[in-house]
Image: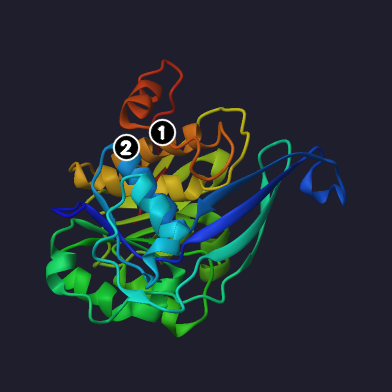
Amino acid sequence: MTGNLQVLGFGALAIDDIIYVDSPLGAGKGKVTNRTKDHGGNVATALVAVAKLGGRAGFIGWLSDQPLTDVGAHELERHGVDISFAPRRSDAKPIRSVITVAPDGDRFIAYDDDVPHGTSDALADSVLAQAQVLLIDGYAMHADMIVARARKLGLAVVADIEWTVGPATERLIRLSNHLVLPLKFAQTYTGEAKATAILRKLWSDDRSAVVLTEGDRGAYIRQKDDVVLWHVPAYKVRAVDTTGAGDCFHGAYAFALTQGKQPVACAVYATAAAAISVTGRGGRMALPDHNACVAWMAKENAPVPIPITSPD
């Protein structure tokens, strides 16, 4: 599959062994009620979400140079993600994760990430320039020059960062003009507790948007050229499995950007997509299509953006 793409991304692939238990995660022990296996990885699942929504997505992270046995790559292709521009190396392999999911959909992820991260510095500008958006996660610190080149080429860089290793992470945060971060990480990173204070602290003149996600409490947004901060409440759903919900949010947000939507509207769309994604098992099994998102957004009880306060 080749051709003009809308959203590119790089990050490690993952194979997830998922165990469902009958007790809360803090109970200490519980009975296994079900097991399943799914494929994951923050950026990889976000790109699958883009493809499911009808976008043209391409994975440009490291893949194995043994394509016949590269299960993760086959899964991306099966879901409609272009892998033709991905660099290859002999030691590329997926992260292996074990995920425990409680009855309320909450989960704990244990993973081994001793795998190649980032992408090749030799990736051509012509590959990057065909897209409108670049999706990255915290491992992009291993290829920050690619991120910098993408910004110079005019791509929107949507960053999904969940932890910091110091200066390398700070450089990524500076390079990304759409920070879409979990609120808990942003609190730790900035030392601020309130979403409004974090939105102000992470802002810069080079930023297009800062989005803070808080699961079933929704998302908080500051967008360029807007004097108002916004809160997008979450949908009220019975969560089966929250695995991959954040990845789905990032993918839907990126896809909405390619449709010319402003960040608050992107967050509204992504909130609907993420809500649908938690109603099924695994990180990819319940990813929605565009029509499903539109239908949810049209419901009478669909959450709408709420002004919080002036950013100044």
Query: Image check: 258 left or right of 51?
Result: left
- Snapshot quadrant of residue 141: bottom left
Q: Amino acid at mark 2?
A: Leu
Estimate the x, y position of residue 178 in percent, counting from the top left: 32, 59
Where 64 sits versus 107, above or below? Answer: below
Q: Give the mark, 2 or 1, whose residue is nearer the N terminus.
A: 2
Q: Residues within 10 Å of mark 2 (few under 14, many from 20)?
A: many
Where 258 sits versus 167, above or below? Answer: above
Quadrant containing the C terminus is bottom left
Where 190 sits versus 226, above or below? Answer: below
- State the SS at label 1: loop
Number of residue marks: 2
- Tell which residue pokes out farthest to the top in this image: 300
Instruction: Tell me the residue that label 2 is attached to.
Output: 53
Q: Amino acid at mark 1?
A: Pro
Estimate the x, y position of residue 59 in percent, counting from the top left: 32, 60
The alpha-carbon separation of the residues under discs 2 and 1 comes to 7 Å
Q: Residues within 10 Å of mark 1 (few under 14, many from 20)?
A: many
Q: Are marks 2 and 1 in contact (CB under 8 Å)?
A: yes
* Badge number at residue 288: 1
